[in-house]
Image (cartoon, helix red, strand yellow):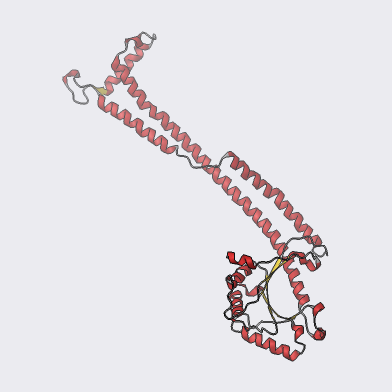
Amino acid sequence: APSIYNGLMTEVSTSKERNFNLVTFIDTPGLVDGSFQYPFPVEDVIVSVARHTDLIYIFFDPHGQALCERTLNVIERLNLEHAEKMRYFLSKADMVPHERDRQKVVVQITQNLSSRIRNKHAFELPSLYIPDKAAASAGKIDNIIEKTCEEMEATINQNVQNNLDKLEADCLAIGVAIEGLLSADAAKRKVNRKRATYGYALFLLSLVPLLVLATFGVHLLQLEWLRDSHPHAPQVLDAVAHVCEAIVHRAGEGGDSALGVGGVLTVQQLVLGTLGAFALLQLCSRLLRSYKPTLSRREVAGLSQTAAYVAVKLLDKKARLYKLYLDQCNSDDFPWTAKAVSVAV
């Protein structure tokens, strides 16, 4: 929602201690009940952001004790989708110096959450506070902040491996997809070549009826100059005349207009038949020459170059990064840009 933009604020820390530069913290606002109205759907926003995080940290202070109904509703919704990512803490535990009082707070929070979460049997609510700013009486209070930092570091390491593995899987998927596109394009081109062969063959065949009709027209016109045009022209014209008279029957010849007396076809039938055959063959030729769409040469070249780049350079880079990760994963100078994200409610 655009109304959330006014509530966003970013702070950048230059610290590199404990992989701090690899972690992005998303601190959500404290939720209150009553008539207070947020300028944006705060519960929906928190749930949406949680889908993109690796860890969800929920902090309860000793005074709130998980009594806010809106907070409990958000926890319930988060627990339905992301129970394995959620961690619960009793923050500012150093403000409650007596163990008995802390236990009361823990019991109260646990009771309020018992009906809202699924993993209630393995529920833990450890104490967490900042040692440098702790009260003087906090020395005897257990602090899980070190284990929490170790969990973040483990999440970062796991993200590095997952991202490198995903890079390889994505490269292979891209290669398979491009190979499929090129194979499909090659198959279409093969079909188009076959259609073109048959189509142009029918086109040439469609010229035969026109040639027959033109030959019959020459026979009817009895052009004398054709006989004198070549020494063998009279023999050819006489042969054509015999064929035409054997095929075409002209009414009025021999005193009988019935078919079969002077030929098997009338002039009208010959003309309509040859024109019909020409039109039919032309139609079939056009239908066969309806080609499937194919990739242009530039597109084929681009896909081939992309496949080569992914298969050679990206996969080689992944192998080098993975080796670098294995060599330096225990080093203090950890040169990775993975991130572990947490949400605090």
Q: State left or right for residue 98 relative to residue 232.
A: right
Q: Does residue 279 appear in this view?
A: yes
Q: Does residue 265 appear in this view?
A: no
Looking at the image, which is closer to me, 65 or 322?
A: 65
Tally of marks: 0
Can you name the residue that lies furthest to the left here? 255
Q: Whole-percent x and y of residue 131?
A: 80, 78
Asked if 269 appears above or below 193 in the picture, the reply is: above
Q: Whole-percent x and y of residue 116?
A: 59, 81
Residue 79: quadrant of the picture: bottom right
Q: State left or right for residue 343 relative to residue 246.
A: right
The quarter of the image holding the C terminus is bottom right
Residue name at image x 34 percent, y 20 percent: 215
Q: Whole-percent x and y of residue 236?
A: 36, 14
Residue name at image x 38 percent, y 9 percent: 229
Looking at the image, which is closer to me, 308 or 239?
A: 308
Asked if 37 appears above or below 160 in the picture, the reply is: below
Q: Whole-percent x and y of residue 63?
A: 69, 85
The quarter of the image holding the N terminus is bottom right
